[in-house]
Amino acid sequence: MSISSRFAVAIHILSLISINRGGVNTSEYIAASVNTNPVVIRRIMGMLKNAGLVNVHSGIAGAELARNLSDITLLDVYKTVNVVQDKELFSVHDNPNPSCPVGRNIQDTVLPLFTTAQLALEKALGSVTIEDVVNDITRKLELEKLQE
């Protein structure tokens, strides 16, 4: 199982828009940074726009953040781009065999574990903002400059 790469790409987009603040943030520019097709970027940007995280201007203007970095958590981004059925990260297979001792008990056994894991993930993502990500990237860029 894997969380969609849209999540990482969305974080990349928001971070790049912030770091390139005042610059031109077209889908082509962002796609070059992500190393993907601009169509992929436009699709994710549409999701971010619908969630009120970015403002998109067609043409040369590109995109800008619609909210302060400190007001956008990774949980906000995760919920925006990960369209998960019933909003659950984990799911249990349907219709296990009730004649089997494992089949008739597996759902009641693993569902509480899955719920605990999902809540832990959401808590962790909710405690980190895009500002935290951008600050870390900025520190790394400054270290790179010092090493040159």
Image (tube, grey):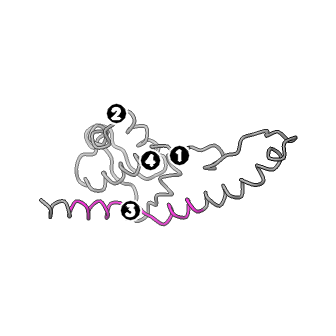
Q: Magenta segment, principal secondary structure?
A: helix
Q: Quadrant of residue 70?
A: bottom left
| Residue kind at label 3, given as amino acid type | Asn
Q: Which residue is mark 1?
A: 82
Q: CA distance from mark 4 to mark 2?
A: 17 Å
Image quadrant holding the C terminus, namely: bottom left
Work out whether 42 lies above or below 11: above
Q: Please name the residue shown 71% across and 58% down the image.
A: 112
Q: Which residue is mark 2?
A: 37
**Residue 40 spot, x, y in % from top left:** 40, 36
Residue density around tag 3, few if under 14, some if 14–19, many if 20 or more, within 10 Å: few
| Residue kind at label 4, given as amino acid type | Leu
Residue density around tag 2, few if under 14, some if 14–19, many if 20 or more, within 10 Å: few
Q: As rendered, which of 64 and 135 lies closer to the eye?
A: 135
**Residue 88 spot, x, y in % from top left:** 63, 50
Q: Residue furthest left?
A: 148
Q: Which residue is mark 3?
A: 68
Region of the chain picked out in magenta, as a range: 120-142
